[in-house]
Image (spheres, rainbow, N blue to C red):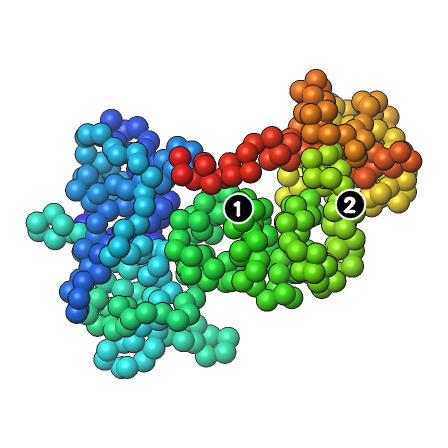
Amino acid sequence: MTTVTRAYVSRLAGLTVFDPNGDRVGKVRDVVVALRVGTACPRVLGLVVEVVARRRIFVPMGRVTAIDPGAVMLASGTLNLKRFEQRAGETLVLGELLDRQVRINESGRPAHVVDAGMEQTRTGDWLLTRLAVQEPGRIGRRGQLHQLAWDEVAGLALPQTGQGAETLIATYRELNAADMAHALQELPIKRRHEVAEAMDDERLADVLGELPEAEQITILGTLEESRAADVLEEMDPDDAADLLSELHDVDRNRLLELMEPDEAESVRQLLKYSEDTAGGMMTSEPVILAPDATIAEALARVRQEEITPALASQVYVCRPPSATPTGRYLGLAHIQRLLREPPSTLVSGVLDDLEPLRPEAPLAEVTRYFATYNLVAAPVVDAQGRLVGAVSVDDVLDHLLPDDWRDRARRG
């Protein structure tokens, strides 16, 4: 490997961290620096490393023996696994410096930070010595990019009334929704809301679904009503219903009015059920097929990226209409069975006659049902024999775990 003494921070994000024995420790999630008075280059204090169970710890730069293009190596010794907590005077490069508004000293032109370069000195210390900044672009064109020394820009020490987040979001684009939610919670509150505001509706909807309810409500409340309604439309109906159920009646009804009628109706149907019942836990958008659908069609449907693995494990055959509540429910087919049959076979010919859940089934009954039949999803059918939704195992776990389980996991 080629050891480097200079590195841009955005390229460190996501690098695997190894101990001296070559065992994986975790991944780099940020770099901690101490800003100084005047134009002196900030000292790099250490790395924020995500280890098992998404716990983020602080690794001092003195423990880093090498930074290679594809990995970070640590010296021997015991790591402090205490959860990282940002101290006064510390700044997160990815979380707080990226997208900061600055002024280029030579030209006086405004720009924003898109990356920061760190360099190892002869004494072994690391300093933040370079900044990549981009000027505002004209319509349809990117602004000019500059790589400048730290003292060639001004404004980093000034308080920011509003800060973009596009560069930070791009740096974290490979994170799944759960990891992005965890990263969001590690940011200061003001920065957290700026990042949420800058996400597109679909990404924010996915991330909201992984946050504690209190944080979901807070972030939703920072958005304009029309934007909040758009984000709710992108959420899974059951997640949107859970979130709306925590709002005051006036706020809930206002947002439902702003949503598209079809999307709002799906959520309203779920809001009718008690939270700890099959109806309150289910999604109203499982994979539903007509009686004349073939296995090839079924497999094509479950391949769709937006369908969760749990819901993709089963397809449900119903008479028209195919939207919930459907016509008469006929049965379900497991994905394993579909894979063993010829593609031209009708799905209705390989149905399982498993007794479905009723919408009013309480949590204890739903849990026993999943345990008895070793399922990851289950159909919910009303008294008229119509499929009204499906419960997935992750929905059951969400209701079995304490309300603050996400916060507990983050705190370790």
Q: Residue visible at 40% across and 39% down? A: 411
| Residue 14, picture quadrant | top left
> Crowdedness of circle 2 by 10 Å Cα count: few (<14), some, many (20+)?
few
Q: Residue visible at 32% across and 80% down? A: 109
Q: Residue visible at 70% across and 17% down? A: 372
Q: Is residue 54 above or below residue 166?
A: above
Q: Are marks 1 and 2 in contact (CB under 8 Å)?
A: no
Q: Is residue 282 above or below residue 20?
A: below
Q: Nearer the viewer, mark 1 or mark 2?
A: 2
Residue annotated with mark 1: 211
Q: Is residue 214 above or below residue 50?
A: below
Q: Nearer the viewer, residue 244 or 374?
A: 244
Assign a secondary structure to mark 1: loop
What percent of the width, then of the height, locates residue 84?
A: 32, 43
Residue annotated with mark 2: 272
| Residue 258, picture quadrant | bottom right
Q: Amino acid at mark 2?
A: Lys
Q: CA distance from mark 1 to mark 2?
A: 24 Å
What percent of the width, then of the height, locates residue 67?
A: 24, 44
What percent of the width, then of the height, locates residue 16?
A: 34, 39
Q: Residue visible at 74% across and 50% down? A: 267
What percent of the width, then of the height, locates residue 342?
A: 78, 26
